[in-house]
Amino acid sequence: MIERLENPAAAAEWSAAQRAAGRTLGFVPTMGALHAGHLSLVRRALEENDAACVSVFVNPLQFDEAQDFDHYPRDFARDVELLDGVGCSMVFTGTLAQFFPDELDADGRLLPQHYVEPGAAAAGLEGACRSGHFEGVATIVDRLFDVVQPTHAYFGQKDYQQALVVTDLARRRGGPKVRVCPIAREPHGLARSSRNERLPADVRERAAVIHRALVAADQLWGTGERDADALASRLSAVLATEPGFELEYAELRDPRAWGPEAPHGSLERAVALVAGRFGPVRLIDNLVLGDAS
Ligand code: PAF
């Protein structure tokens, strides 16, 4: 039976007891509304550790739009049930005030000096589109790592840039070891995301255009094309076939030479990244080109 804890202090105590018993601990930070992608991270954590735990906290620090925060799906009871079903050992939640006692101002906002610097990987793409997003992510993930002090932490590749940011954060802190796990997809290709719940069924199918665009760029890569602009044009051309998709970016990056600007010229390695909206729902996805072959 899963241990359900309602505050970070209790989670810290539980995690310390695991460590004291010599057990390795795999940790999956989430914002809840769990889906198959999250559960695959928990299964991987259970394979590689003696116990697995999950946090569920819709972190207000990382939302740049109040409506996105307000409409973010929440169902803690269902999350607990799903986690119990896959053998997760502990799940915890908390409030902003519990995570940051003595660090909030009179209006309940985190004082600026307590934000954690997200590092160079935060520049460009998501960092450019969502002001303050990665500061919010780095700040809560740093605190969650303090609470759990896990052996390994598991993140999905869907949030490619976030994975870079938290890997760098963990390196600067001296741990935990970060594992980045493959993207889980719906049958028609849409990357699984808690935000998909807000899409009507027909839009979910149309949103598969994002995956089709990534696959088209991958196919072009497979023919030997290495020019960054040619690959980006293929992405944009496929995305443009879906009039309901409001594009924010469709760009390439060299995963080992990450920078805020889109590269030009020939690439040795490439990840294609897309972000945009169907109505109010913002979606992101990516594909490392040539990975499937
Ligand atoms: O990927 C997410 O769900 C969130 O950004 C995270 C890592 C749980 C931090 O709030």
Image: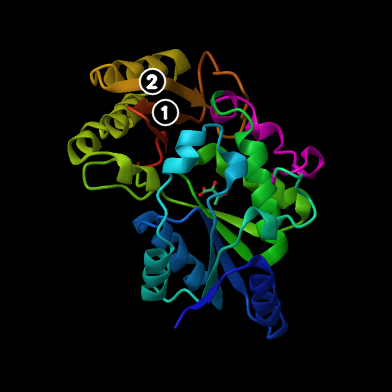
Is the residue at mark 1 in contact range of ligand 1, meaning its CB lies under 8 Å from it?
Answer: no
Q: Residue furthest front?
A: 106
Distance from disc 2 to disc 1, alpha carbons, whole Å, reads: 8 Å
Q: Nearer the viewer, residue 209 or 262?
A: 209
Q: In the image, what residue occupies the spot 46% across and 42% down?
A: 70
Residue 244 sits in quarter: top left
**Badge 1: how crowded within 10 Å, few (<14), some, or many (20+)?**
many
Q: In the image, what residue occupies the spot 77% across and 42% down?
A: 111
Place of residue 277 in the rendered image (x, y in percent of width and height, measured from the top left)? 37, 27
Residue tagged 1: 274
As helix, strand or loop, the secondary structure at mark 2 comes to strand
Instruction: Identify the disc placed on residue 247.
Output: 2
Q: In the rendered structure, are the residues bearing label 2 and label 1 in contact, judged by CB atoms less than 8 Å apart?
A: yes
Q: Earlier in the sequence, mark 2 or mark 1?
A: 2
As helix, strand or loop, the secondary structure at mark 1 comes to strand
**Badge 2: how crowded within 10 Å, few (<14), some, or many (20+)?**
some
Q: Amino acid at mark 1?
A: Val
Q: In the rendered image of this protein, does residue 51 appear above or below residue 152?
A: below
Q: In the rendered image of this protein, does residue 150 appear above or below residue 50?
A: above
Place of residue 217 in the rendered image (x, y in percent of width and height, measured from the top left)? 34, 26
| Residue 165 shows up from this direction | no
Q: Residue 126 magenta-drawn?
A: yes
Question: Looking at the image, is mark 2 or mark 1 nearer the viewer?
Answer: 2
| Residue 220 shows up from this direction | yes
Read off the magenta span. 108-128
Place of residue 186 in the rendered image (x, y in percent of width and height, measured from the top left)? 27, 47
Place of residue 286 in the rendered image (x, y in percent of width and height, measured from the top left)? 42, 35
Q: Residue furthest left?
A: 202
In the rendered picture of this protein, how many numbered marks are placed on residues?
Answer: 2
